[in-house]
Image (spheres, helix red, strand yellow):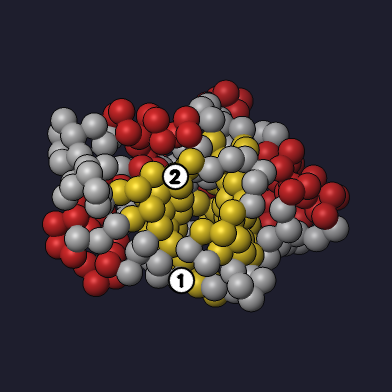
Amino acid sequence: MEIQILGAHQLELKGARLTSLLIDGTLVVDAGGLTSALSLPEQKKIKTVLLTHHHFDHTRDLVTLAANAGYYWQGQLKVYALRYTLDIVTNCLLDGKMYANFLEYPSKEKPTLILEAIEPYSRKTIAGYDVLAVPVKHSVPAVGYQITSSDDKSLFYTGDTTVGISDCWQHISPQLLIAEVAGPNKYGDWLKKAGHLCAELLKEELTQFRQLKGYLPRVIVIHIGNPFEQEIKEEVAQVAQELEADISLGYEDMKITL
């Protein structure tokens, strides 16, 4: 399994893209900074998108990917998410008012986007992977995904989340954990209220993971708050040292092979 981080940041600016992951060139998890990271031939390989929640920085490029697929190669994309997430994305992003309605374009019989609701804690085979959606705590309904390949390579991506994510540890056993740190420790209280993590809060959750599972997988941190990146990097490095674990910041176009 090869994971490519297309977007590792909370804000978009030169050299930084919104959150998005690409697995084995075909499966996308969150669609924040997606199309600007890939050529048209690379985009054409994508068949499936998983969304953790409806926030714009995780869904924006669903429209631009659909436009390229619909206009240039008349492809179809399956999009999986909670029913709550799909309803909001349909009403606010795919309503056809600002762009074509890709739920009906090029035709109702063969639309560009096919939406499918997923149920929490229910394993589902998606694009050849075993996918388990696990609820995580955020400011809106959200899930993280454990994605396991046919050769038992496994990752868990938390999406946006905050304190209490340890509730889902009992359901997963990944070799790679991709988590978030949106700001520095000095804003820990505010981040918790906003549904996010700082390095110190992440440390608490990882400590509980180790206590419960008896190991700690490699951890990559994304959804990085751009203005605080150096501070976050230093604080994450301190957590890695204290836990004696492999924990580091992700970055745009980073590739991890399991």
Residue 163, horizontal then vertical, whole percent: 67, 34
**Horizontal and vertical percent position of residue 91:** 31, 28
Picture disc at residue 24:
1
Q: Quadrant of the C terminus?
A: bottom right
Asked whether, in this view, residue 111 is left or right of residue 225, the answer is left
Q: Give the left or right position of residue 169, taking residue 128 as reference.
A: right
Place of residue 119 in the rendered image (x, y in percent of width and height, measured from the top left): 58, 40
Q: Amino acid at mark 1?
A: Asp
Identify the residue at horizontal 78%, vertical 47% (top origin): 170
- Percent position (x, y) of residue 199? 62, 44
Quarter assignment of residue 54: top left
Q: Report the disc number at residue 130.
A: none
Disc 2 residue crowd, few under 14, some 14–19, many 20+, Cα 10 Å: few
Cα separation between marks 1 and 2 = 21 Å
Amino acid marked by disc 2: Glu
What residue would you read off at disc 2? 116
Q: Note whether 36 is above or below 53 in the view shown.
A: below
> What secondary structure is found at the residue carrying circle 2?
strand
Looking at the image, residue 208 sits to the left or right of residue 128; the answer is right
Which residue shows up at 18% across the image and 34% down it? 96
